[in-house]
Amino acid sequence: MALELYLDLYSQPCRSVYMFAKKNNIKFDFKKMSLFGGEQYGEEFGKVNLVRKAPAMRDGDFCMGESIAIMTYLAQKFHTPDHWYPADLQKRARVNEYLSWQHTAVRMHGSKVFWLRVFIPKLLGDDVPKDKMTAALEELDGSLKLIEEKFLEDRPFIAGNEISLADVVAIVEIMQPVGSGLDVFASRPKLSAWKERVRAALGPELFDEAHQIILNAKEMADNMDISVLQPFKPKLLRLFL
């Protein structure tokens, strides 16, 4: 049975898995999902990931979720070049440090800004309160400063001179608010230069392909039937407001 990856490229973790697998020529059956369409709640997907979140992977009889776990599994199974998940103790520790930090920092803050700028106004039928937006932007700014000052410092990439899993996970999260029309790189030349190095290392064509869907998010939101989000409205408002 071919390796199967269940992905929706609107999702940041799904994009990281997709780009990593594609860049390393790992052959997989791309099982496209629509999280907005609720496909994660289908009976078949529940057999792959009982948590009902994407990404998910099926490798023969072995199934798992969680993007970082999937990428480290693929890196070790397919013996990808060492720089992705270095054998060197301290370089790997740098990668693991970033991967451990990002869940409740840049991911949370980037996602919040994205939802507040793209979908929450549609659910509310009105603009997001200014104080909520200001606070969300300040939280995102704090995370981006930490990426520059702590995780990058003066290195080309997070773990050193070559791209790693940490950079792939970082870039997809930072691109999420960009999909809302917010240019987070405009006043951050250091972050912007890093982004261009990551794009070049992954390959511009692959990078642009993976992010095309999120960069069209505002257009999609303008044209979507907002009723598909109504069942999730109470949860979304609790999360983001």
Image: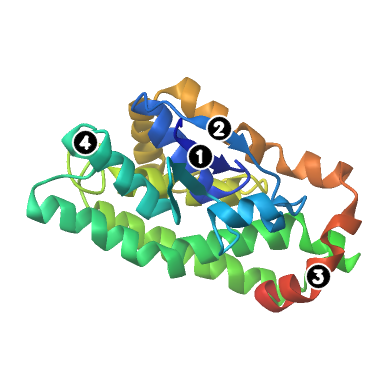
- Residue contact between numbered discs 1 and 2, judged by CB atoms under 8 Å: yes
What numbered label is drawn on residue 5? 1
As displayed, is residue 126 above or below residue 24?
Answer: below
Q: Closer to the camera: disc 3 or disc 1?
A: 1
Residue 117 horizontal/vertical position (percent)? 72, 57
**Element under label 3?**
helix
What colour scheme was applied to this rendering of the protein? rainbow
As displayed, is residue 214 above or below residue 134?
Answer: above
Query: Which of marks 1 and 3 precedes in the sequence?
Result: 1
Residue 134 horizontal/vertical position (percent)? 64, 70
Identify the residue under disc 3: 233
Is any atom of residue 192 visible in this view?
Answer: yes
The foreground one among 226 and 30 is 30
Q: Closer to the camera: disc 2 or disc 4?
A: 2
Measured Cα–Cα span from mark 4 to mark 3: 42 Å
Is any atom of residue 150 visible in this view?
Answer: no
Identify the residue under disc 2: 30
**Element under label 1?**
strand
Residue located 16% across and 44% down the image: 86
Residue located 71% across and 37% down the image: 216
Identify the residue under disc 4: 162
Q: Closer to the camera: disc 4 or disc 3?
A: 3
Measured Cα–Cα span from mark 3 to mark 1: 28 Å
Query: Which of marks 1 and 4 precedes in the sequence?
Result: 1
